[in-house]
Image: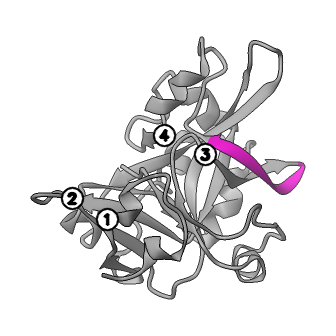
């Protein structure tokens, strides 16, 4: 799964790499957690960045608590599951990040590790988004991150990993007119292990309330 990630780079660095001119609301993020707002790229005539809540709430959900169990969608079933199938068809997004955390089971405490691209640059997870109506009539936009089987590197810590899209696939993923299910699912593969790196970080990051550079410092 993917239950925590980072977006720590400065606006100009991230914008240049992603080829989108966006602002990082509130500055660098070292410990993005479920239910928090985070930037995602959507197609609305053109590619735009919007802040959405992490934890997808389908339009038919009875309350927003539904989002606590939908922070991740499995690549193998995302096209069929009721919570995701409508969004998979026409509401795909890029979740902007530059790292993610996984925890190695250990005694007496789990040991968190951070994964990044080998060059340290930002990237995009494959995501889906939905719009839900609150009881007061206001819109609540939310997203989920798609996961797939782990590559050789992440498998040392966890058996799943988030789907990191290649830059050349961004346009196809965002294009709501592209409806070929098998073509879309072919993008949901493990990122090559030799293009990533991993290092252990402090248990400080395990508390979702903690923020700041200390979260990403190598142990």
Q: Are marks 2 and 1 in contact (CB under 8 Å)?
A: yes
* Distance Cα–Cα, label 1 vs label 3: 20 Å
Q: Earlier in the sequence, mark 2 or mark 4?
A: 4
* Any part of residue 190 in sight: no
Give the label, 4 or 3, closer to the camera.
3
Q: Earlier in the sequence, mark 1 or mark 3?
A: 3
Q: Earlier in the sequence, mark 2 or mark 3?
A: 3
* Distance Cα–Cα, label 4 vs label 3: 11 Å
Where 36 falls versus 211 (above or below)?
A: above
**Please, what secondary structure does the residue beneath circle 3 have?**
loop
Overall secondary structure of the magenta section: strand
Give the label, 2 or 4, closer to the camera.
2
Query: Is residue 199 within the magenta segment?
Result: no
Give the label, 1 or 3, closer to the camera.
1
* Distance Cα–Cα, label 2 vs label 1: 8 Å
Q: Which mark is residue 203?
A: 1
Give the magenta part as a residue range: 45-53
Question: Callout 1: 10 Å neighbours few (<14), some, many (20+)?
Answer: some
């Amino acid at each position: 799964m993917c239950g925590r990630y980072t977006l720590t780079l400065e606006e100009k660095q991230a914008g240049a790499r992603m080829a989108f001119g966006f602002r990082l609301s509130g500055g660098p993020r070292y410990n993005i957690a479920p239910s928090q707002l985070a930037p995602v790229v959507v197609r609305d005539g053109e590619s735009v960045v919007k802040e959405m809540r992490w934890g997808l709430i389908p339009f038919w959900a009875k309350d927003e608590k539904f989002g606590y169990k939908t922070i991740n969608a499995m690549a193998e079933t995302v096209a069929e599951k009721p919570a995701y199938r409508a969004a998979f068809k026409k509401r795909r997004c890029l979740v902007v990040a530059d790292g993610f955390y996984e925890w190695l089971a250990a005694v007496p405490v789990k040991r968190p590790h951070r994964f990044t691209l080998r060059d340290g640059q930002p990237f995009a997870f494959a995501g889906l988004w939905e719009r839900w109506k609150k009881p007061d009539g206001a819109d609540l936009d939310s997203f989920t991150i798609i996961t797939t089987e782990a590559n050789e590197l992440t498998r040392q810590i966890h058996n799943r990993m988030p789907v990191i899209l290649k830059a050349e696939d961004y346009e196809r993923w965002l294009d709501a007119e592209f409806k070929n299910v098998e073509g879309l699912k072919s993008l949901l593969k493990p990122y090559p292990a030799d293009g990533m790196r991993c290092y252990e970080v402090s248990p400080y990051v395990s508390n979702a309330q903690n923020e700041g550079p200390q979260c990403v410092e190598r142990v």
